[in-house]
Image (cartoon, coloured by chain):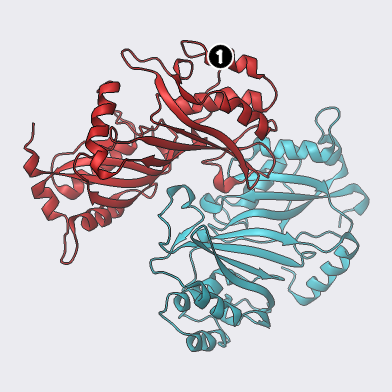
Chain colours: A cyan, B red
Amino acid sequence: MTETSQIVRARLDFAYDGTEFSGWALQPGLRTVQGDLEAALARLLREETPTVVVAGRTDAGVHARAQVAHVDLSATAWSRLPGRAQRTPSEGLLAGLNGVLPPDIRVHAVAEAAPGFDARFSATERRYVYRINDGAVPADPLTRRFIVTHDRPLDVDALNAASGTLTGLRDFAAFCKRREGATTIRTLTEFSWARRDGLLEATVRADAFCHSMVRSLVGAVLPVGDGRRDLEWLAATAASDQRSPAVTVAPAHGLTLEEVVYPPDAELASRAETTRARRELT
Amino acid sequence: MTETSQIVRARLDFAYDGTEFSGWALQPGLRTVQGDLEAALARLLREETPTVVVAGRTDAGVHARAQVAHVDLSATAWSRLPGRAQRTPSEGLLAGLNGVLPPDIRVHAVAEAAPGFDARFSATERRYVYRINDGAVPADPLTRRFIVTHDRPLDVDALNAASGTLTGLRDFAAFCKRREGATTIRTLTEFSWARRDGLLEATVRADAFCHSMVRSLVGAVLPVGDGRRDLEWLAATAASDQRSPAVTVAPAHGLTLEEVVYPPDAELASRAETTRARRELT
């Protein structure tokens, strides 16, 4: 273990267009957000590549407008970051990262993290938005990277009736890729639909999500929204103790992580402890 | 000249992401919107490549959400377009074009044009929007293809004060690339700024625009909006009878053609005649 006194934990707030990434997590030979970010940090810090811990490990093609991560840096590297006079290490790292990162990743803020802050385990809520054009407005090539086309008209009331049956504290095994030893129990705080400028937007909030859970939830209610399935079908599907082959996982590019919520600074450490205890540590 | 009776003029309404095009107009060896559209038509019509005439000849990198064009097809080709029963030629061409065109061009509507319709010369007005993020909201990688970053804060009132001095019927030589025999007199109906969701949007409407005129107008008022120049400078610049080197043409990717306005069908032909008489025919 490293000595705490020589380590500075930095919080990074950033956004990315997921189109040309194979998701967040490092994968050999593939371009990933973690890979690009860690390479940029290594270049700026002139040290070994640090490990970046993220709040929401997005899948390939999924975007983020407000992603949060932390990275532990040596006090020596941190002190070198200003680069020039009248600049803090945080300001130096912010300018440096945006200077070396490609245009599909932009860093919004860098700060020394509050004591006890863990980007992943301190978070109390993730908010995602899924965006669909069901033909109510003309196809817009400029937004095709983050808005999915659905080839049947959707009824927003039917969508909300369906989504409303899935919220609360429950086992989401029917919407999760099975992972040995990992719980699939989550609290789905919100799953609601609204039409905005002709587009359909699903807001999905939970304490945390298992792998591809948001896209499975969206995929489960879309056939109810366009009239191909009914609420009984959805209830039977949701009750399954394993991922249902009847659910088509919605395309990745419609999904954007819009917010990660943390408790007040005084509760960061205890929140992280609670989360760690409930979930696996990998 | 072809015999009118054997020709069907089709009106195409479409949109494109200009990022990966070298503009609208055909250029040997370069990817252009006209090139892609004419190639798609040739493939669907199984005829010689037709010429597509467009309302707004956008520059490289400029986008269009509501572009309009016309194309003259032989009655024989037109009659083959349905492709299957219970489909009109227009419906067949619409489905066919969206099937063969790349995802950065989407066709919204195809229709047999009203008599006298000319996509370019019948138009009475073009409306463009220029979008800027001056740092009031975080950089969004998802919209980086159509929103320009300006590195100084902009004052919307100062922008409007500046833009307001440039509207009306006048000679826009100071904002036009000189072209032999072509007039630079235009009616600038609107040039106004508003902040929407933290972004700055300029709406620019005119009967027509000369080459890179919108981007020159935007480039001329930005230094007034961020305080580097004043209205006297702008007045002197605008009074020039040739393009001023003091004006930085604003980047192409912030500009989107949002609307082309046509008169009622009964006035299409006379409007085209008037426009042709006032401008050059090339």
**Residue A206: x %, y % from top left:** 68, 71
For mark 1, name the chain.
B
Residue B279 visible in the shown view:
no
Q: Is residue B2 above or below residue B211?
A: below
Asked which quadrant contains residue B193, the reply is top right
Q: Is residue B259 above or below residue A191?
A: above
| Number of disc labels | 1
Which residue lies at the image location 68% right of the left edge and 45% below the top edge?
B138
Q: Nearer the viewer, residue A271 or A203?
A: A203
| Mark 1, residue position | B237
Q: Nearer the viewer, residue B225 or A249?
A: B225
Q: Is residue A100 above or below residue A198?
A: above
Asked which quadrant contains residue A116, the reply is bottom right
Which residue lies at the image location 53% right of the left edge and 13% below the top edge?
B245
Image quarter in which the N terminus of chain B is found: top left
Image quarter in which the C terminus of chain B is found: top left
**Residue B81: x %, y % from top left:** 16, 55
Kind of residue at disc 1: Thr
Which residue lies at the image location 56% right of the left edge and 48% below the top edge?
B142
Whether residue B260 sits left or right of residue A258 in the image: it is left
**Residue A133: x %, y % from top left:** 45, 61
Whether residue A48 sits left or right of residue A240 in the image: it is right
> Which residue in the rendered view is the most extreme toward the top?
B241
Q: Nearer the viewer, residue A46 or B224?
A: B224
Which residue lies at the image location 51% right of the left edge and 57% below the top edge?
A197
**Residue B152: x %, y % from top left:** 69, 30
> Which residue in the rendered view is the most extreme toward the right?
A5
Q: Quick one: SS at disc 1?
A: helix
